[in-house]
Amino acid sequence: PFVLMTLANLRGWCSWDSMVLGPFITKLMNLRPTDTMDPANELLNELNSNIVDNVCGGIFSRMEPFRRWITQMRVANELIMTEKEKVQTILSSVTAGIEAGYKLTKTVDWMVPDNVTMLKYVVQHIKLDPAKKRLRQYNGDRLVDE
């Protein structure tokens, strides 16, 4: 809106401003966040086809930079949508992890045993660990790894 108003002031006011430029600026001001860039791209198309020539007063040195700027806005919109998809993928996996963790904490009884019971089961696990049994090598009556 500021650029359009500045350009209109530079060329002078006319009836076109109230009939076309004013309603277009209102559309720009009422643009709201959405899931896609479609509304913004529609406004860029309208700006490029109906507004640029008149608001620049037909002056080529104003129109061409303005058109290039509009093109770069379209490119930026595409990049934003690409980045949105990447972020959405990351967030959906994080959300799934949080939901799984929440369900796990609700379904498992998380009672921590006392120290004596914990020590008993840790020692039992060490003695009966199947992976360790496979790695043990006997040297007579004594284990090599002891």
Image: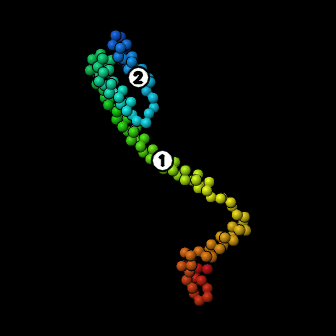
Residue highlighted by disc 1:
92
Q: Residues within 10 Å of mark 2 (few under 14, many from 20)?
A: some
Please determine whether, in this image, residue 79 is positioned above or below residue 97.
above
Q: Residue at 35% across / 14% down in the picture?
A: 19
The vertical placement of 11 against 134, above or below, is above
- The secondary structure type at the circle numbered 2 is helix
The residue located at (59%, 74%) in the rendering is 129
Quadrant in which the C terminus is drawn: bottom right
Residue 12 seen by the camera: no
Residue 69 percent across, percent down from the top left: 34, 28
Determine the residue positioned at 39% across, 18% down: 23
Q: Name the residue rendered at 69%, 61% in the picture.
A: 112
Residue 138, placed above or below residue 47: below
Q: Is residue 53 left or right of residue 145?
A: left
- Badge 2 amino acid: Lys
Gap in angstroms between the C-alphas marked 1 and 2: 33 Å
- Residue 144: % across, % down: 58, 82
Quadrant of the image for the N terminus?
A: top left
Q: Residues within 10 Å of mark 1 (few under 14, many from 20)?
A: few
Please report contact status of discs 1 and 2: CB closer than 8 Å, yes or no: no
Q: Quadrant of residue 27?
A: top left
Helix, strand or loop for disc 1: helix
Quick check: 125 left or right of 2? right
Give the amino acid type for the residue marked by disc 1 in the picture: Ser
Query: Toward which corner of the image does residue 116 lie, by quadrant?
Result: bottom right
Q: Position of residue 84 (x, y in %)?
A: 42, 41
Reading the image, the residue beneath label 2 is: 27
Q: Nearer the viewer, residue 39 or 49?
A: 39
Question: Which of 46/77 is in front?
Answer: 46
